[in-house]
Amino acid sequence: MTITSAGVHERHERTAALLSEVRSLVGPLLRHSVDGLPAGAVREAARYYFGFTDADGNPARGATGKTVRAALVLATAEALGTRNDAVLNAAAAVELVQGFTLILDDVLDRDVVRHGRPAVWSVFGTPTALLTGNALLAVGMSMLGHRDLPGRAVTLLGSATAAMCQGADADTAFETRDGVTVEDCLTMSRQKTGLFLGACAGLGAYAAHAATEKVELLTEAFTTAGVAFQFANDLLGIWGDEAKTGKPTGSDLVGLKRTLVTVDALGHNSAPGRELAALYAAGTPLTADETARAAELVAATGAGHRALHAVGQYARRALALIGKAVPAPGQRAGLEALAAMPAGYYRAGATEEGPRT
């Protein structure tokens, strides 16, 4: 299955329209859920995370994230002929749980920027950030108690969130562990990113009361697409444009992160691979000059181009699975747009120095 440039443009427009619609539908549910938290620092931090307020508690525009996961819930249900309150509840639920994962991720990585603003922990402190994430997780899971959502939906999202926690732990452990392999990173990426995205599709299918086979196909399709997203995200961790991604350029290299891209480069039997390994072996955060040099070395090993190729490979596998689950082309267009999104996500956020197809 070939993804043409015309097809990419059409899918990009469809995705942009879908995300805009989802924000208008799910935004009020998110605000209602967050405003329903007990008064105090946790509620204020949650309001800040979703962009409802600024760091001083003043009203802000909101919608700091892309709402891809909520869009996936809606697109899956609509591909199967359903849109109802259960679908919207599930869409809001995954955005709340996603908030838990990202707040936690920033604490673990000590990232000080998220969505172009100071990360929650850097504004409210680590204890409040962790408690805010837990509050969002609890509220999100409670939203799956809708009468039109089967108990299996709760189990699916709960299992995916537990796997995400294991993936996040492995990701952190890799920073100080020798001998990390690309296979290790793939397993971690499936746990940390893939299974949660797959669960979003599964929730949409459950809300549409789809047959088990369709639920499983669509869940696996977007678990696969989730790995494509992780490849794209790891590429942006090296060649991301800070003005576009909201995170410092080269952040993964500065912190000696072992990702799908850097582990491939570190294991490359070449002079650039060995020089990069020597930089990592020093065990101290890289300076600006060292970061620039490390990016050159990763590029010289070809790891960037291999990762970009993998983005396309995983997206094509996802599209094939979607085609099996939803045979009618007209019904699956929204799902195809979301599955093909990782390549566009990389292109939109990358600097000119990053690898290109």
Image (cartoon, rainbow, N blue to C red):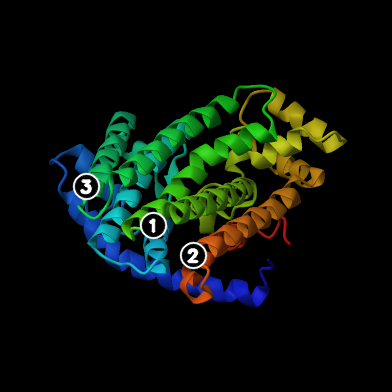
Choose between 295 and 320: the one closer to the eye: 320
The quadrant where residue 297 appears: top right
Number of other residues with Cα within 10 Å of mark 3, as a class: few under 14, some 14 to 19, many 20 or more: some
| Mark 3 to mark 2 CA distance (whole Å) | 25 Å
Q: Mark 3 or mark 2, which has the lower sequence index?
A: 3
Q: Residue furthest left?
A: 39
Q: Mark 2 and 1 residues: CB-CB less than 8 Å, in contact?
A: no
Number of other residues with Cα within 10 Å of mark 1, as a class: few under 14, some 14 to 19, many 20 or more: many
Choose between 17 and 157: the one closer to the eye: 157
Give me the disc on residue 248. none
| Mark 3 to mark 1 CA distance (whole Å) | 16 Å
Name the residue that disc number 2 marks: 335
Q: Residue at x 33, y 46 (%)?
A: 153
Number of other residues with Cα within 10 Å of mark 2, as a class: few under 14, some 14 to 19, many 20 or more: many
Q: Mark 3 or mark 1, which has the lower sequence index?
A: 3
- Which of discs 3 and 1 lies nearer the camera? The answer is 1
The quadrant where residue 320 appears: bottom right
Q: Amino acid at mark 3?
A: Gly
Picture coordinates of residue 264 (x, y %)?
Answer: 73, 38
Quarter of the figure that contains the N terminus:
bottom right
